[in-house]
Each structure stands twice: as structure tokens, then as C-alpha cells.
Amino acid sequence: MQTRNSDWLLTIVRLVAGGFFVYASLDKIIHPEAFAKIVHNYRILPGELINIFAIILPWLELFCGMALILGTRIQGASALLAALTVVFLIAVSSAIARGIKIDCGCFSTSGDGARKVGTPLLIQDAVLLILLLLVWIKGAGRWALDRVNQHG
């Protein structure tokens, strides 16, 4: 019984984390130039890396998020997303420490109602990191393509 409950919990965690990243990627993919401006506002990357980062990051979020939702390549997808989340935590912490008041660029590039960089964002990213590490360590849970391939 305990294993069945933990399988369900892992499935929910995997779907939530995957859905979070898929949703986060969509507006960035549609508006790469606006996302590049947001990346620039963090004042971390050198200018020549901003555009490539702004183009690659949302697609990485989308593909890894979809992998989590489908339950395939769980180890790689959760490890990549956990690493990205650590980068996000560093970027947000850096902006806070330097007193930079900017939109986070997490879900929207428009600036209208966008989340601001601050402690709530740090908490959100820390929780997300814990969920990703849980999936990375414990696996896919139920209804995962990887499980079908292992058992089929």
C-alpha cells in the first residue's frame, strides 16, 4: 500500500513540475526578443550570450517539461530542470542582492502583471527544486512511458 501511495505522489509531483516548465516556456518561445530583454535586465550574462540563451532556454524548458509529463527520460529531464532551477535561484538572489527591481520573466514577457524578483520567487524556485530532485532520485511514479518500456 505504501508503494502505491508513493507512486501516486511521484506521478503528481512529476506532472506538476513538468506542467510548470511547459507553461513557463510558452510565452518565451512566442516572444524571444522580449525574453532576451528580460535576460539582459538581470545583468549577468555577457551581451553576446543573451540572445542564444533567450532562444535555447524556453525550448529546453518545453522539451524537458514534456518529458516529465510523458514520463520519459525522467533522469535527464529532471536533472536538467533542477540545474536550470539552481541557475534561476542564483540569478534571482543576485538581482535581489544588487537591488535590481525587475520582472522575473518566469511566465510572461509582457511586463503586465509579471512577477517581480523577490523572496516569494526564491521560495517558489526552492520548492520547485525540491520537487525536481524528488523526481530525479525516486523516479517517475505511475503512468510513465519509461515504465512501459521497462515492463513491456
Image (cartoon, rainbow, N blue to C red):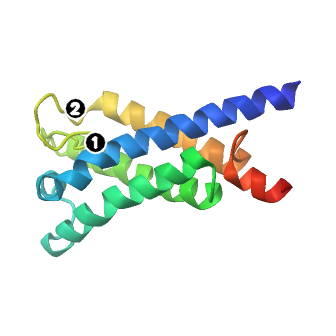
> Is 29 above or below relative to 48?
above
Q: Earlier in the sequence, mark 2 or mark 1?
A: 1
Q: Determine the residue located farthest toward the front in the rendered image.
A: 152
Residue 110 picture location, percent across and down: 11, 40
Q: Determine the residue located farthest toward the bottom in the rendered image.
A: 48
> Is 102 above or below relative to 123?
below
Report the quarter where the C terminus lies. bottom right
Mark 2: few, some, or many residues within 10 Å (few <14, many ≥20)? some
Task: Say whether residue 138 is left or right of residue 84.
Answer: right
> Is 38 above or below relative to 46?
above
Looking at the rendered structure, the secondary structure element under dot 2 is loop
Q: CA distance from mark 2 to mark 1?
A: 7 Å
> What amino acid does circle 2 point to?
Arg
Residue 130 picture location, percent across and down: 56, 39
Return the residue at label 2. 115
Looking at the rendered structure, the secondary structure element under dot 1 is loop
Report the quarter where the N terminus lies. top right
Residue pictured at 63% horizontal, 55% vertical? 72
Mark 1: few, some, or many residues within 10 Å (few <14, many ≥20)? many
User: For this rendering, which residue is in front, 144 or 75?
Assistant: 144
> What amino acid does circle 1 point to?
Cys
Return the residue at label 1. 106
Task: Say whether residue 25 is left or right of residue 21.
Answer: left
Residue pictured at 55% horizontal, 44% vertical? 69
Residue pictured at 23% horizontal, 61% vertical? 54
User: For this rendering, which residue is in front, 119 or 54?
Assistant: 54
The quarter of the displayed image where residue 141 is located:
top right
> Is 54 above or below relative to 92?
below
Asked if the residues shown at circle 2 and circle 1 are in contact, with their CB atoms under 8 angstroms apart, the answer is yes
Residue pictured at 18% horizontal, 33% vertical? 114
